[in-house]
Image (cartoon, helix red, strand yellow):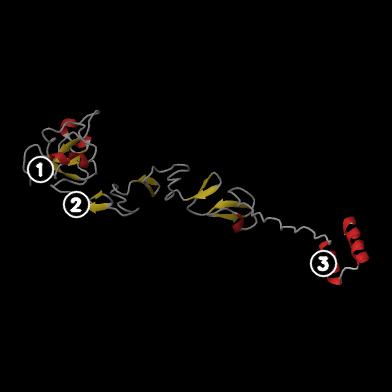
């Protein structure tokens, strides 16, 4: 009780205030100690590979306490003290810190495009048959008598196909292999980036990849609009 509270109590007794008000004054004069908040609980960080440990749960994910130090479990590799699965980790694919490009997945330690990979079409390990190729994540049989992936401009020989002259196996910018002729009259090398750029030449026109169009082959090759060959 403070000195001021004692003076107030003395005045109250002297003036003969009722008991209820006297008790209220006594309560008001009591000093209430501050509430002490409990200390925050700090969680210990997990132990990295090579650090001392007593039990498995001391170590970070995919590691175990081997003797007195943390070690990676089987099929996991040490990447800067953390254990990573290099076969499937997009940030550590095949090697530590080897990050896959956007849109690609890590399959068996390789960064692949599931929309175009014949070995991993649509999903890791989903391989296409020898007569199929992966287009948009689906295994399909190429049209026009062309072998999967056939590309007349990628080798020294043309893969002839169809029933008309100058028809060879080509690929679109979307990755589809089919039998097609040379660039459409009026279409020039560099005329398109995707098949959507070729609608002016008709509904069947597609954008042929630069590596599969005879007249546009070479280091400076560019895409051009082409049409499927009959037959």
Disc 3, SS: helix
Residue 51, placed above or below residue 153: below
Q: Is residue 31 above or below residue 82?
A: below
The answer to whether one can see residue 34 in this image is yes
Where is residue 151? Give x, y as percent: 20, 39
Q: CA distance from mark 3 to mark 1?
A: 104 Å
In the image, residue 41 above or below residue 179: below
Nearest to viewer (mark 3 / mark 2): 3
**CB-based contact (under 8 Å), mark 3 and mark 2:** no
How far apart are labels 1 and 2 at the CA level?
A: 17 Å
Quadrant of the rendered image containing residue 126 = bottom left
- Is 204 situated left or right of 110 in this image? left
Question: Where residue 229 is drawn, which disc sits there?
Answer: 1
Q: Which residue is mark 2?
A: 141
- Say whether residue 141 is left or right of residue 26: left
Label 3 vs 2, first from the N-terminus: 3
Percent across and percent down for residue 192 are 21, 36
Question: Which residue is at the far left?
Answer: 164
Q: Residue at x 20, y 39 (%)?
A: 197
Give the left or right position of residue 181, taking residue 131 as reference. left
Left or right of residue 24: residue 103: left
Question: Which residue is the site of mark 3?
Answer: 24
Q: Position of residue 139 (x, y in %)?
A: 24, 53
**Crowdedness near tag 1: few (<14), some (14–19) or many (≥20) residues, C-alpha within 10 Å:** many
**Which of marks 2 and 1 precedes in the sequence?**
2
Near-viewer residue (19 or 30): 19
Q: Within 10 angstroms of label 3, few (less than 14), some, or many (20 or more) residues?
A: few
Mark 3 or mark 1: which is in front? Answer: 3
Crowding around mark 2 (Cα neighbors within 10 Å: few <14, some 14 to 19, many 20+) is many
Dot 3 or dot 1, earlier in sequence: 3
**C-alpha span from label 3 to label 2:** 94 Å
């Amino acid at each position: 009780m403070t000195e001021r509270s004692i003076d107030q109590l003395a005045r109250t007794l002297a003036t003969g205030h009722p008991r209820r008000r006297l008790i209220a004054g006594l309560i008001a004069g009591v000093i209430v100690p501050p509430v002490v908040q409990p200390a925050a609980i700090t969680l210990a960080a997990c132990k990295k590979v090579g650090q001392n440990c007593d039990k498995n749960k001391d170590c970070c994910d995919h590691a175990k306490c081997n003797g007195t130090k943390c070690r990676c479990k089987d099929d996991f590799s040490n990447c800067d003290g953390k254990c990573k699965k290099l076969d499937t980790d997009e940030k550590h694919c095949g090697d530590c810190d080897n990050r896959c490009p956007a849109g690609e997945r890590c399959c068996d330690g390789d960064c692949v495009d599931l929309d175009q990979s014949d070995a991993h079409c649509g999903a890791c390990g989903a391989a296409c048959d020898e007569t199929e190729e992966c287009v948009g994540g689906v295994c399909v049989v190429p049209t026009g008598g062309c072998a999967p992936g056939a590309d007349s401009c990628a080798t020294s020989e043309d893969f002839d196909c169809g029933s008309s002259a100058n028809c060879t196996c080509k690929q679109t910018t979307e990755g589809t292999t089919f039998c097609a002729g040379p660039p459409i009259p009026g279409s020039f090398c560099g005329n398109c980036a995707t098949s959507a750029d070729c609608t002016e030449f008709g509904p069947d026109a597609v954008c042929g990849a630069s590596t599969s169009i005879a007249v546009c082959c070479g280091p400076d090759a560019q895409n051009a609009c082409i049409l499927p060959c009959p037959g």
